[in-house]
Amino acid sequence: MPLFLVNARDKPNALDLRMENRPAHLDWAKAHTDRIWMAGPVFSDDGETFAGSTFVVEFDSLHEVEAWAANDPYAEAGLFASVEIVPFKWLLGDGKREQ
């Protein structure tokens, strides 16, 4: 299955919205660990303020990734100013290991 990079950036001044929806977002992400190779928050230049979320995920098609990302509780709450989804090829690093 192909990999995709999902880069979502928060709207300005949306920290409260992020924090309100964080438990649901984390539960949602944990329910999809079979598809997630890497995931985590992105920070602003200060290295402390949340600015977005990034995933590397495995799906059969771009359409499937778009549908999956649209169901993220953060997306449903309107947190993101932008979401970029592009095909990705893992070249370096350990990545997801066989279980």
Image (cartoon, helix red, strand yellow):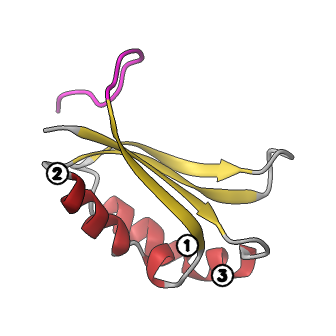
Amino acid type of disc 1? Arg
Q: How many marks?
A: 3
* Res. 22 mark: 1
Q: Which residue is mark 2?
A: 61
Q: Callout 3, which amino acid?
A: Leu
The answer to whether the residue labelled 1 contacts the one labelled 3, judged by CB atoms less than 8 Å apart, is: no
Which secondary structure type mostly characterizes the magenta part of the structure? loop
Q: Is residue 8 above or below residue 47?
A: below
Highlighted range, magenta: 89-99
Determine whether the residue tagged by mark 2 lies in a helix, strand or loop: loop
Q: Is residue 7 above or below residue 81?
A: above
Which residue lies at the image location 34% right of the left edge and 60% below the top edge? 30
Q: CA distance from mark 1 to mark 3?
A: 9 Å
Residue 83: percent from left, percent from top? 49, 61
Residue at 72% x, 80% y is 16
The one nearer the camera, 16 or 82, is 82
Residue 27 location (% of width, % of height): 39, 70
| Residue type at tag 2 | Ser
Q: Residue under circle 3?
A: 17
Q: Where residue 28 sits in the image (x, y, percent)? A: 36, 69
Q: Where, quadrant-wise, is the N terminus in this rendering?
A: top left
